[in-house]
């Protein structure tokens, strides 16, 4: 087990290094852009006075690494900002202030985060259940008509962009059939039932594309396992087909499913931006699009960092789970 | 797998006669898959439409950017005048709500943007991935460690989020489609670089590369003459699947209003306001959505077919040239693992440093232990 503990420790250290590197890259890319950084940061509609204030706040006279250090200091220890006359204290994980609203970016993200987390994690349940279920079903019914239909449907699923599925679902379910009202976010703590009903369509739109990928992966990796010698041995011993499919073949696909899930989390975060924009859910994605459109750089940088943080952590967790599912990884 | 792969690609590199037969073999194997053939025809048609966009719109007598205020009913918020969203002899597919721009023209010019941006982005991805992957595999230990670490970080960056944010800070004067292609290409090369590195590591250990090294060839010459031909098959396979993915990203960015901006038409961008108009002008929603769907589907199926044709193991199931077509078809449809799933699987596991190429999908030995 010490080998496993060492593996987890190495992965944790690697993750920390990756996170630091990502923060450097993002900071440098966004704050070392050619052109008048203060003007871009402040936005196109800023007055010259505001631009000068921004330049001062950003310490634009300092070299880039000093500015990055200030930024990092803000994240670790907090920072004080002078907005006009008063001084605002921005506590520990401080990602700066929005140039549009002077709001603290950390606080802004915290108010938007529950919506995005509800969306992505709910969708994850849907894509895992739907995708793996479809994959198992088509591996079980291999060579029959039902398998061909399922394969066709999943292929079509992978080819449809998230926002097209979302648009069509919204128009058909809410507009034409009027089965559901147009989604409006309700807090889980306020009304769990309404929360789920309103998120149903966003979950489906986000999850259907990803579910198709899971179905294909589960099917192909189960078929691979089914062709292996030990399965033939089980058959020879008289183990039933249900047990072979449900226990042994699914087990064979488990490691790849875990690995794909980490990848999918990354792409689903991007898909969540589309879903939130489409359904008008007040999450991080919608706010990010808004911040991008008004070029509110502190908000953009903060949100990209937080999202990158989640994706990197998800990858690290998946690596550890993968090692649990397939111990050979630890030995390598 | 790699031995057979190398055998077939080394053959291709040897002489021009052998190369011709390699290409012919590839074509024969591709042709044996009916779905891939249909997909190839659809892709060819789309490329043709994209290339001939000015000609097609000239025949129709319209262009994608001219406003026709007389064709929309401004009193009703800009609904197209006439039945079916203004379809008629002048405007084959009707006009855009509010602006009255010709839909057919915007759709065919949109094909140019979609395919052009996706191909250009793929080219950038392949270039960076080959340079980084080969350099990591052939370079000294510290070079490999540095490049692999950078690749890991690039893989960890969420593509949509990064490109969304990057597109915000670039000055508006930069030509938008070029910019979108560059941004996608510069962010999403990590997975391919990892695949290139892994394949190069395998190839490096083969006898013919050792022979080249023993005969005094330099690293650069070995990379160019001995390794690149061997990398062709995996590169083509994976980049064929990157093209539809890139089309999706471009459409998504344009849909959000940060990708390709008006007046340049793009399918994703056409869908931005389509939900408001679905009752008055359903084709305004259905045409770009359908175009995206068909394009991505055809490219995915074609990419899958290319993968099977280039993978000797999968291709042997096609039994091309043995006159047993029907049997081959049955085999191919049940046994070929789906290609779209292959791409994430290879990189998703984050292969431990130094191990080469695909890992077996199933932890077979563990299953045995558990049930023994």
Image (spheres, coloured by chain):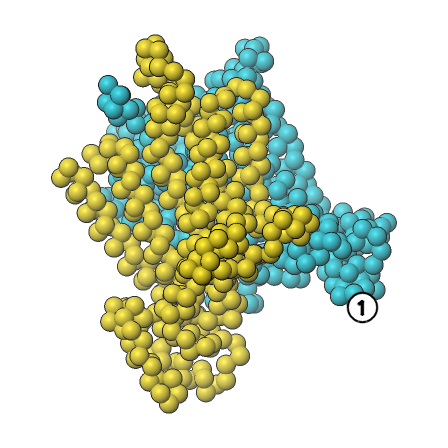
Chain colours: A yellow, B cyan
Q: Is residue A5 left or right of residue B153?
A: left
**Residue A314 to residue A328: above or below:** below
Quarter occupied by the N terminus of chain A: top left
Q: Residue furthest bottom?
A: A85
Q: Is residue B190 left or right of residue A177?
A: left
Residue sitting at 51 percent across and 60 percent down? A185
In the rendering, at what x and y percent does residue B370 appear? 25, 24
Residue sitting at 43 percent across and 21 percent down? B313
Mark 1, secondary structure of its residue: helix
Residue sitting at 81 percent across and 54 percent down? B86
Give the camera-side residue of A62 and A275: A275
Give the camera-side residue of B51 and A81: A81
Q: Residue furthest left?
A: A2
Whether residue A303 is visible here, answered yes or no, is yes
Give the camera-side residue of B13 and A215: A215
In the rendering, at what x and y percent does residue B122 appear? 50, 45
**Residue B114 to residue A307: above or below:** above
- Crowd class of label 1 (few under 14; some 14 to 19; many from 20; radius 10 Å): few
- Total marks shown come to 1
Quarter occupied by the C terminus of chain A: top left
Mark 1 — on which chain does it sit? B
Residue sitting at 53 percent across and 22 percent down? B333
In the rendering, at what x and y percent does residue B209 appear? 31, 29
In the rendering, at what x and y percent does residue B134 appear? 35, 41
**Residue A308 to residue B173: above or below:** above
Whether residue B128 is visible here, answered yes or no, is no
Give the camera-side residue of B334 and B146: B334
**Residue A281 to residue B300: above or below:** below
Q: Which residue is mark 1?
A: B75
């Amino acid at each position: 087990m010490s080998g496993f503990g060492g593996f987890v420790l190495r992965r944790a250290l690697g993750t920390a290094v990756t996170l630091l590197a990502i923060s450097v890259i993002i900071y440098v890319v966004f704050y070392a852009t050619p052109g008048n950084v203060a003007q871009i940061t402040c936005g196109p509609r800023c007055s010259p006075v505001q631009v000068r204030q921004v330049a001062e706040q950003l310490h634009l006279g300092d070299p880039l690494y000093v500015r990055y250090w200030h930024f990092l200091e803000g994240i670790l220890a907090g920072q004080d900002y002078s907005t006009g006359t008063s001084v605002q204290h921005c506590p520990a994980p401080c990602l700066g202030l929005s140039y549009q609203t002077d709001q603290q970016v950390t606080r802004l993200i915290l108010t938007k985060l529950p919506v995005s987390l509800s969306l992505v994690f709910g969708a994850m349940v849907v894509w895992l259940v739907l995708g793996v279920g479809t994959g198992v079903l088509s591996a079980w019914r291999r060579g029959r008509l039902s398998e061909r239909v399922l394969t066709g449907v999943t292929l079509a699923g992978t080819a449809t962009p998230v926002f097209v599925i979302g648009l069509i679902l919204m128009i058909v379910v809410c507009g034409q059939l009027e089965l559901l009202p147009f989604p409006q976010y309700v807090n889980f703590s306020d009304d769990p039932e309404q929360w789920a009903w309103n998120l149903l369509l966003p979950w489906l739109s986000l999850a259907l594309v990803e579910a198709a990928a899971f179905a294909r992966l589960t099917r192909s990796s189960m078929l691979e396992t089914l062709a292996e010698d030990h399965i033939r041995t089980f058959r020879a011993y008289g183990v039933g087909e249900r047990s072979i499919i449900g226990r042994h073949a699914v087990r064979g696909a488990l490691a790849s499913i875990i690995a794909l899930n980490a990848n999918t989390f990354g792409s689903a975060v991007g898909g969540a931006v589309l879903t939130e924009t489409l359904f008008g859910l007040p999450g991080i994605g919608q706010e990010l699009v808004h911040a991008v459109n008004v070029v509110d750089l502190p908000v953009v940088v903060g949100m990209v960092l937080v999202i990158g943080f989640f994706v990197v952590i998800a990858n690290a967790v998946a690596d550890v789970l993968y090692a649990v599912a397939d111990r050979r990884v630890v030995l390598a | 797998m790699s031995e057979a792969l190398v055998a077939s690609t080394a053959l291709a590199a040897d002489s021009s006669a052998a190369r011709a037969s390699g290409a012919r073999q590839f074509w024969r194997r591709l042709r044996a898959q009916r779905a891939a053939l249909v997909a190839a025809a659809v892709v060819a048609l789309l490329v043709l439409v994209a290339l001939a966009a000015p000609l097609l719109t000239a025949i129709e007598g319209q262009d994608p950017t001219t406003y026709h205020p007389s064709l929309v009913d401004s009193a009703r918020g800009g609904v197209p005048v006439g039945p079916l969203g203004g379809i008629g002899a002048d405007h084959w597919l009707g006009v855009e709500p509010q602006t009255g721009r010709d839909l057919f023209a915007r759709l065919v010019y949109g094909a140019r943007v979609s395919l052009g941006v996706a191909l250009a982005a793929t080219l950038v991805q392949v270039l960076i991935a080959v340079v980084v992957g080969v350099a990591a595999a052939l370079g000294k230990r510290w070079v490999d460690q540095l490049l692999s670490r950078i690749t890991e970080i690039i893989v960890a960056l969420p593509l949509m989020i990064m490109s969304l944010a990057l597109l915000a800070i670039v000055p508006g004067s930069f030509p938008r489609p070029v910019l979108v292609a560059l941004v996608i290409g510069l962010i999403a090369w990590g997975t391919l670089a990892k695949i290139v590195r892994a394949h190069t590591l395998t190839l490096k250990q083969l006898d013919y590369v050792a022979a080249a090294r023993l005969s005094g060839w330099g690293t650069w010459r070995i990379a160019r003459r001995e390794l690149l031909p061997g990398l062709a098959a995996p590169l083509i396979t994976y980049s064929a699947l990157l093209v539809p993915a890139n089309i999706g990203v471009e459409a998504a960015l344009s849909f959000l209003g940060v990708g390709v901006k008006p007046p340049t038409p793009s399918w994703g961008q056409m869908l931005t306001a389509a939900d408001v108009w679905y009752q008055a002008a359903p084709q305004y929603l259905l045409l770009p959505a359908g175009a995206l769907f068909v394009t991505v589907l055809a490219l995915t199926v074609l990419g899958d077919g290319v993968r099977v044709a280039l993978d000797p193991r999968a291709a042997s199931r096609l039994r091309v040239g043995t006159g047993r077509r029907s049997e081959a078809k049955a085999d191919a449809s049940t046994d070929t693992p789906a290609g779209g799933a292959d791409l994430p699987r290879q990189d998703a596991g984050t292969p431990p440093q130094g191990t080469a190429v695909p890992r077996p999908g199933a932890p077979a030995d563990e299953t045995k232990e558990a049930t023994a």
